[in-house]
Image (cartoon, grey):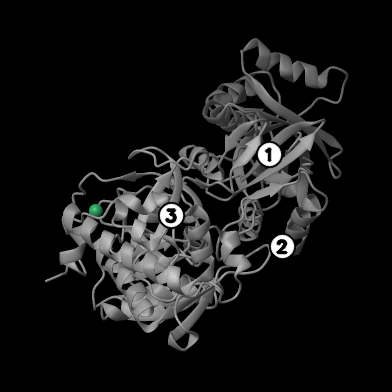
Amino acid sequence: MAIQQLSIFVENKSGALADITGILADNSIDLRALSIAETQDFGILRLIVNDTNKAAKALRDKNCVVNITEICAVAVPDAPGGLASVLRILADADIVVEYTYAFISNSKKDAYVVLRINDHDLVTAEKLFAEKGIREINEQDIQSL
Amino acid sequence: MKKQYWQEEIETASREELSKIQSERLVATVKRVYEKVPMYRERMDAAGVKPEDIQSIADITKLPFTTKQDLRDTYPYGMFAVPMDQVVELHASSGTTGKQVVVGYTEKDVHSWGEICARALVAAGADETDFVHVSYGYGLFTGGFGLHYGAQQIGATAIPVSSGQTKRQVTILEDFGSTVLCCTPSYAMTIAESVEAAGIDASKLPLRAGIFGAEPWTEEMRKHIEDKLKIKAYDIYGLTEVMGPGVSFTCEHQCGMHVNEDHFIIEVLNPDTFEPVEDGMIGEIVFTCINKEAFPVIRYRTKDLGYVTHEKCKCGRTFVRMSKILGRTDDMLIIRGVNVFPSQIETVLLEQGYAPNYMLIVDRVNNSDTLEVQVEVSPEMFSDVTSVLTSHEKKLQTAIRELLGIHANVKLVAPNTIPRFEGKAKRVIDNRQLHD
Ligand SMILES: [Zn+2]
C-alpha cells in the first residue's frame, strides 16, 4: 500500500531549489506534495510526484543525488484531533515516525498526512491503520489526485 | 622475455658502487659549477668552501643550499652551467607568484631524462608493446616530455594527448588502446569519473597501469584510482628544477619511490636545523644533480616533506626509496597552532568512503581560525532522513578531531560542485588576512 517518495539533496544556496523544480518542469513531472527539511548546511527536498521513476532519472541525469523511499500516506479525518489520533495509534505501538508532512487534494477536498516510518515497522503500521479504519492512499490514488 | 629493469647493472648496483659513482660525479659537478656559475662560486666563497674540499658524498653537507628564490633571482639563464649553444631544450616551472624558473637541457640531459623515465616505465611493467598515453601538459611545464622520451627509449608508442578535453581522453583510451596512463592523480580521478559517466566498463579497456605524480597524493587515493580504472597505479616524482618527473619512481612492490641515485643525491633534513635526519624520520627533501650538464642544482631545497629508507627492496633495486610526499612546507596550514596537511584530511575522507573531491576553507572568525571541510554527498550515503546525513557529518568531524586534534566544520555539498582538476589540484582556500 505504501507510496513512493522522492528525496533530493539540496544545497543551501539561492537557485538550488529553482534548478531542481525546473528539471521536473522540463520533464512534465507533476508535483503532488512537497516538503523541505533543512539543516544549517543543506536541505532535503521530499516530493510525491505523478511519475517517480521518470523524475528520479531526470534528476540523476543532471547530477542530483536522489533516493526513493516507501512512505505511508493516510487520509486524515476532517475534525479536530484528526492527526493526533493517527499519531497516537503509532505511539501506542512504539512505532517511531521519522517525519511527517501534510498535503491536500484540490479535487477531493481531502487532507492527507505523509508518515515516514522505518521499513521494519511499516507492515505493522499498515495493519493498525486497517484495523482502526484509517484510509491509506495508494499509487492509483496519487495518479487521480 | 619481459625486462624487469631498464638498466639492471646500475639499478641493482651495490651501495659501495653507488657511493663511488655519486662521489666521483659530485666532485666533478661541484668543480664545474664553481667555474661556470657565478652564484655557486659566490655562495661557496662566502661559506669558505673550495671545490677541493669536496672529496666524496660525505662532504656534501659543507655545500650551501640553493632555494627557489635563488633560481628566480638568476632568471632566466643565470644558473646555466653550459654555453647556450649547447642547450637543446628549455622548460620553466609553473611559478604562480613572481618570476618563473627557467631550466635548460643539453642533448645528454634530454637523454638522461628519458632514461630515468624509461626506468620508471619498465618498473611499471611497460615494454615496446605498450601504448603510453601521456596526459600531463606538454608545454613549458616539464610534465609530459620526460615520460614521452622514456616511452620512446623503451620502444613503446608514446601518445602525447596532453591534459584537458577529458571526453577526448576517454575516446583515445578506448580507440587508441592506451595501456599505460601518465598524468596527475587528480586528473586520473577526473578521467575515471568521465569513463564511468560514459557508461564504459573500465575493466574492458586495455589500460592496465598508471604512472601518476606531480602532486602529493595518498595511499588511499591510489587504491581508489586502481579500483575505479581497474589498473595498477605507480607513483612518479620529480620537479622541474631538478629534472622533471622521473627523479624517483615506484616498482611493482609500491613501497616507496626508488631515487635514480646515479643522477641525483637525496638528503632528508630537519626543516628547522637543516641537519640530516635518520632513515624513517620526516624532513625536507633536498636534491643535488650529479649527472646533469646544463642545469645542475646543488642541494636544492624542494620544500617537499618525506622520509627515506635504505632497506633492500624485494624488486632487487638498490636505489634508496623515498616515501610519498607527505606535504609541502608551503602547503602546511597552521590552524589554531596545529600543523595540518591537506593529505591528512584526504586520508580520513577516503577511509570513510567519500570520493577524494574536497575543498578546505580556512578563515578567521573572532581571532580564531576556522576550518571548513566541504565534501560531496554520494548516492550511497544519501538518505531522506536528516539525522542520517548529519550523523555522517559528525562522524567525519570526530575522525578529523581524533587525527588532528582540531574542530573542523564538515559541510556536505551537492555532487559535481567541487572543482575537478586537469593538472595539480587546488584544495585549499585560505581566507585569513594574516598580519604579522
Ligand atoms: Zn623496489
Q: Quadrant of residue B247?
A: bottom left
Amino acid at circle 3: Leu
Of badges 3 and 2, nearer the viewer stands 3
Image quarter where the C terminus of chain B lies is top right
Residue A37 visible to the viewer: yes
Q: Which residue is mark 3?
A: B63
Output the chain of dot 2: A
Q: Which residue is mark 1?
A: B372
Local packing at callout 3 (Cα closer than 10 Å; few below 14, some 14-19, many 20+) is many
> Looking at the image, which residue sits at the far left?
B1
Local packing at callout 2 (Cα closer than 10 Å; few below 14, some 14-19, many 20+) is few
Output the chain of dot 3: B
- Residue at 30% x, 61% y is B260
Query: For the residues marked 3 and 2, what is the alpha-carbon distance in whole angstroms?
Result: 70 Å
Residue A48 visible to the viewer: no
- Residue at 54% x, 29% y is B399
Relative image position of residue B190 (x, y in whole percent): 52, 62
- Residue at 25% x, 51% y is B253
Q: Which residue is mark 2?
A: A27
Q: Tell whether A52 sits left or right of B60.
A: right
| For the residues bearing labels 2 and 1, Cβ distance under 8 angstroms | no
**Relative to residue B49, is residue A98 depicted above or below?**
above
